[in-house]
Amino acid sequence: MQDLDFSLTAEEIEQFHRNGFIGPFDLYEPEEMEKNLRALRPKLLNTKKAIYSQDKAVSGVTNLANYDRHLDVDFLAEHISKPEIVHRVASLLGPDVLCWRSEFFPKYPGDEGTDWHQADNFSNVAGSKHPQIVWPEDAEFGGTITVWSAFTEASIENGCLQFIPGSHKTMNYDESKTMTYDADSINKKEKGGVRRGFFGYDYRQLQKDPHWSPDESKAESQVMRQGQFIIFWSTLMHASHPHSGLNDQMRLGFAGRYLPTSVKVYPHSDALEEFGGAASLDRFGNVLVSGKDEFQHNRFVETTVNGYRFPVR
């Protein structure tokens, strides 16, 4: 039986380049995703095999133990490599593609929405100020492709994503600036009449123009049923609604981040530093999900031994 091809059509590729996102697409049926989620939860609670395990965390407010869990949880390793995802991403980035990062984004009843933000080289979230990703000098753009999967339903009421179409072509934020952490501001500040924050930070502190504000009249809510995914540039203006608290169900998103193999990942760092947390990158490796690596400037994982995917150079 011939393998199915999930590559984007020419029209979809044009739409992606115009809007900065495409989708949502179906990946799992809701009942299938719910079954997977039930099996996944106890594995996520056990962080002993996570590459940034609790005893490796140096400091900070960010729990790094649940970053990059695709490196120790089989279901997530399979998920980031699904042809439904990889074929579409390769349509945008070319045939040689790696996954360098995955993250969970839970939103609990009553949680604030996430600030409008963009990310190009991800340097601001790192205390060292080193870019986490570096594109070739002749590249026309930066950022990363994010594939955000709805592991639960994502509705306006429980905090689904919001995008401003076409906003990925201009960076409104300076990632070399610094944000100030304020734990007391969480769930307590309104911006434009909406409770928003950024994990204890205020992303507006990075604005190039302090008097600028995003045109929220152009924002589109990305409602997704459980088991769907959406693809977008990290440089796209994106945010999320608050969780209204009208039900007691957590909204859970899982983001895989993809790059062409020409991009350097963590080229200046030996530790992952995120919002005040830090952990060694000794066990880190990229996953080659499509094609081959002709550049030899990144570490990749090759195999699983006793639950770990050891990096190979």
Image (cartoon, rainbow, N blue to C red):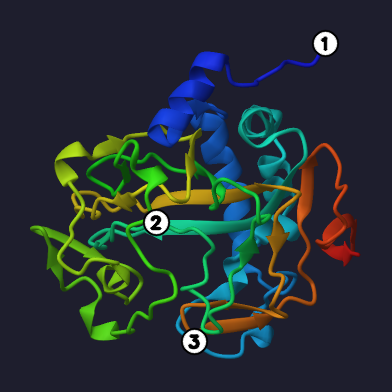
Residue 150's disc number = none
Q: Residues within 10 Å of mark 3 (few under 14, many from 20)?
A: few
- Residue sitting at the far front: 138
16 w.r.t. 174: above or below: above
Counting from the top left corner in percent of width and height, residue 15 is at 44, 24
Question: Relative to residue 85, is residue 216 drawn left or right?
Answer: left
In whole angstroms, how far apart are the C-alphas of marks 3 and 2? 23 Å
- The first of marks 3 and 1 along the sequence is 1
In whole angstroms, how far apart are the C-alphas of marks 3 and 1? 49 Å
Residue appearing at x 32%, y 77% in the figure: 200
Q: Please give the residue where the numbered disc 1 appears in the rendered image.
A: 2
Q: Please give the residue where the numbered disc 3 appears in the rendered image.
A: 60
Circle 1: element type: loop
Type of residue at label 1?
A: Gln
Counting from the top left corner in percent of width and height, residue 216 is at 17, 46
Question: Relative to residue 176, is residue 50 drawn left or right?
Answer: right
- The first of marks 3 and 2 along the sequence is 3
Q: Tell me the mark number nearer the camera, choosing from 3 and 2.
A: 2
Identify the image quadrant of residue 220: top left
Residue appearing at x 48%, y 22% in the figure: 14
Q: Please give the residue where the numbered disc 2 appears in the rendered image.
A: 118
263 w.r.t. 125: above or below: above
